[in-house]
Image (cartoon, rainbow, N blue to C red):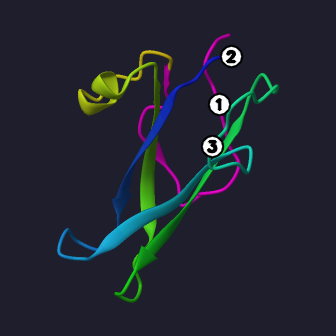
Amino acid sequence: MKVKLLLIFLCFSYFASSQVRVLNLLVEGQASPIGIATIQPRFSWQLNSENRNVKQTIYQILVATSKLNLEKNIGDVWSSGKIDSEETVNISFGGNN
């Protein structure tokens, strides 16, 4: 599978005024996942905030062949859809190969 880009949209229980950053976007534990041989790679990320009690409540993963598609919110390879979950580790790719 050839995947060029990954973008994760996250919604948080703390309102927009919170300073939340998504860090360490990984595919199969790698920051630069070139040549991954698995059919269903797993995605992980970390959240960072200076505020207390900030947690993820929803995520969406978009996998696209170009940065332009991601900027348009188009996951032309795969979109997870909005998932109600606090999970941030080992989220499996659900697209077709």
Amino acid type of the residue tagged 1 in the rendering? Phe
Tell me the number on the disc at residue 44: none
Looking at the rendered image, the disc whose residue lies closer to the viewer, 1 or 2, is 2
Q: Quadrant of residue 96?
A: top right
> How crowded is the residue under tag 1: few (<14 C-alpha within 10 Å), some, or many (20+)?
some
The answer to whether the residues at label 1 and label 2 have Cβ atoms under 8 Å apart is yes
- Percent position (x, y) of residue 86? 54, 61
Amino acid type of the residue tagged 3 in the rendering? Ser
Which residue does the numbered mark 2 point to in the structure image? 1
Amino acid type of the residue tagged 2 in the rendering? Met
Which residue does the numbered mark 1 point to in the structure image? 93
Residue at (36% x, 87% y) in the render: 50
- Percent position (x, y) of residue 35? 74, 27
Ranked by sequence position, the earlier of labels 1 and 3 is 3
Is 61 above or below relative to 19? above
Give the camera-side residue of 92 and 13: 92
Asked if residue 62 lies left or right of residue 14, the reply is right
Residue at (17% x, 75% y) in the render: 17
Point out the stretch of residues depicted in magenta. 78-97
Determine whether the residue tagged by mark 3 lies in a helix, strand or loop: loop
Q: Quadrant of residue 60?
A: top left
